Image: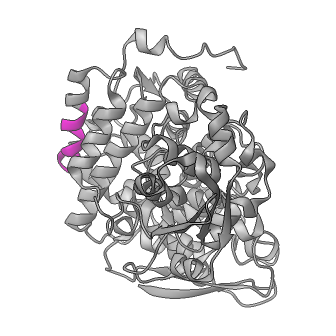
């Protein structure tokens, strides 16, 4: 990996295009290096993982509405070069940007797929819907798709390692637009100039504030990455037609760094693979066993194992979770969001309340993507009483470990101090979730398949599950025109469970 210093330049300064971060990313995207076998294997795992979450969310209102929008944009111009793209749950083919939109919402709705946390946080699996949609539409092979996804993951991971967005209240999908555009560039074998322009456009159109993840969190939390993926598809289309982007997009005098991030004097150091260096970023990412914000994964597992030691939960006087800066301020009491203690809060808000999550995990000893968030569950009097007793505190050591570049030391957990009414204090801690690569039960292919089977049960017919899993595991071997197998359909009866989508503009 080579580290690239990135800062603001005045318009009058000599700053050749070859030094622009967008150009350097485009060079990585257009490097024809082979994808390592372990990277390709993990990409297949994440294709399965995304489909699992999409199956669980296919009847939820935001997903049904996004799907209805995509269905209003069918692709009917059959040719040898353009085929349209698939949408989870239904047959037919649709315009690729709208397929990316619908599938992006389905994948993101339950906050249940993969994650990477560093200077910023991200869900790199958000790259898959847009890159896959373009691959299907353009009749690419499974190997082409693997190459494109390796780039999408690599660029997102590298940007997340180096550039903090949330510190400046910018939503993390600002790293997704550029990574998806770069991945599409690799997929299509585009030249560096075209990918450069697409990256600039994708970044310019996907910067927004973090209010989507603050206060009363709405369904836009799921739509935001889908929007970024859709913008990436459209940006590539425009760039292929010869249209340009604001430049230099990150480093310009009125660019992203100067006015949205650290300001004119800020400098970031972005690591990128050198020429001929394999793209292995996906191997540093991790998926979720529980449908909750990633920084609550280890605390959920910690709550499970504390149940026996605590015993009678009514005897708890207080619980303090000592954890990292990110956890404390994003999903803990450091956020100062009263909504995180509101029994009538939205699912999206409860998903971002470690106090609620820890209380329910401690009481139930299990976690479910629907039942754990139901209004009946959130409004149980004993849950509300316990919930109010939980707080978080930033701990410098947990913050240091969160930011560590050593994968053996990097941690996203917490130390729980449970004080009983008797005065006894029970202390336990967990650094990483059980499903983490360094956890008690690391996820491998069997676990990804089991996750898909569990979430698809009662939604996707058994034969359709088998067909999809077979195709997904053969992704590197799929020939041109066969990528439409990387989806699933469900029955009309299942689709009928979704709320009827009100008529919009389309």
Question: Which residue occupies 25% across, 59% down?
Answer: 40
Q: Quadrant of the C terminus?
A: top right
Q: Is residue 346 visible?
A: yes
Is residue 235 highlighted in magenta? no
Vertically, is 87 above or below 273?
A: above
Q: Is residue 276 or residue 44 the one in the foreground? A: 44
- Render colour scheme: one colour
Q: Main secondary structure of the magenta part?
A: helix
Vertically, is 407 above or below 74?
A: below
Residue 333 placement: quadrant: bottom right
Residue 217 position within the rendered picture, expressed as x and y whole percent measured from the top left = 72, 43
Q: Is residue 105 or residue 497 the one in the foreground? A: 497
Vertically, is 264 above or below 389?
A: below
Q: Is residue 3 or residue 345 the one in the foreground? A: 345
Q: Is residue 237 visible?
A: no
Residue 303 position within the rendered picture, expressed as x and y whole percent measured from the top left = 47, 54
Residue 369 position within the rendered picture, expressed as x and y whole percent measured from the top left = 48, 36
Q: Is residue 34 or residue 423 the one in the foreground? A: 423
Q: Quadrant of the N terminus?
A: bottom left
Question: Which residue occupies 63% across, 34% down?
Answer: 378
Q: Which residues are magenta?
A: 468-477
Question: Which residue occupies 46% across, 74% down?
Answer: 27
Left or right? Give the position of 213 relative to 286.
right
Residue 206 position within the rendered picture, expressed as x and y whole percent measured from the top left = 68, 54
Vertically, is 93 above or below 479?
A: above
Q: How many marks?
A: 0
């Amino acid at each position: 990996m080579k580290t690239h210093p990135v800062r603001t330049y005045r318009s009058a300064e000599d700053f050749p295009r070859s030094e622009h971060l967008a150009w350097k990313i485009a060079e990585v995207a257009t490097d024809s290096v082979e994808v390592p076998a372990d990277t390709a294997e993990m990409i297949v795992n994440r294709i399965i993982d995304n489909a699992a979450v999409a199956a669980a969310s296919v009847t939820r209102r935001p997903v049904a509405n996004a799907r209805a929008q995509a269905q209003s944009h069918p692709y009917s111009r059959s040719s040898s070069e353009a085929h349209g793209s698939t949408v989870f749950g239904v047959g037919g083919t649709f315009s690729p940007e709208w397929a990316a939109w619908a599938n992006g919402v389905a994948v993101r709705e339950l906050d249940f797929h993969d994650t990477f946390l560093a200077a910023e946080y991200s869900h790199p699996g958000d790259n898959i819907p847009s890159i896959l949609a373009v691959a299907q539409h353009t009749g690419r092979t499974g190997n082409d798709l693997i190459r494109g996804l390796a780039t999408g993951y690599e660029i997102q991971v590298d940007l997340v390692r180096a550039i903090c967005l949330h510190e400046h209240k910018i939503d993390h999908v600002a790293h997704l637009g550029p990574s998806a555009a770069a991945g599409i560039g690799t997929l299509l074998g585009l030249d560096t100039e075209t990918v450069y322009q697409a990256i600039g456009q994708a970044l310019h159109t996907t910067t927004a504030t973090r209010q989507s993840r603050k206060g009363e969190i709405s369904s836009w939390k799921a739509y935001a990455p889908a929007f970024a993926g859709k913008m990436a598809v459209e940006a590539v289309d425009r760039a292929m037609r010869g249209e340009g982007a604001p430049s230099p997009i990150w480093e310009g005098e009125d660019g992203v760094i100067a006015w949205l991030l650290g300001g004119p004097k800020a400098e970031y150091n972005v690591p990128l693979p050198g020429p001929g260096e394999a793209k292995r970023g996906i191997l540093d990412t991790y998926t979720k066993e529980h449908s909750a914000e990633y920084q609550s994964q280890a605390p959920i597992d910690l709550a499970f194992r504390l149940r026996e030691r605590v015993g009678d939960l009514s005897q708890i006087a207080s619980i303090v979770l000592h954890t990292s800066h990110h956890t404390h301020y994003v999903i803990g009491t450091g956020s100062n969001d009263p909504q995180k203690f509101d029994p009538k809060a939205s699912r999206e808000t409860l998903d971002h309340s470690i106090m609620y999550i820890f209380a329910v995990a401690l009481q139930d000893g299990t976690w479910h993507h629907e039942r754990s968030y139901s209004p009946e569950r959130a409004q149980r009097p004993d849950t509300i009483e316990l919930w109010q007793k939980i707080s978080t505190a930033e701990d410098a050591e947990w913050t240091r470990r969160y930011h560590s570049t050593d994968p053996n030391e990097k941690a996203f957990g917490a130390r729980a101090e449970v004080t009983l009414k008797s005065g006894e204090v029970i202390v336990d801690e967990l650094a990483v979730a059980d499903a983490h690569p360094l956890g008690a039960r690391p996820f491998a292919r069997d676990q990804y398949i089991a996750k898909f089977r569990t979430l698809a049960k009662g939604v996707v017919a058994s034969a359709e599950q088998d067909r999809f899993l077979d195709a997904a595991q053969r992704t590197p071997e799929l020939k041109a025109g066969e990528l439409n197998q990387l989806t699933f359909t469900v029955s009309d009866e299942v689709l009928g469970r979704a709320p009827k989508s009100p008529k919009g503009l389309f």
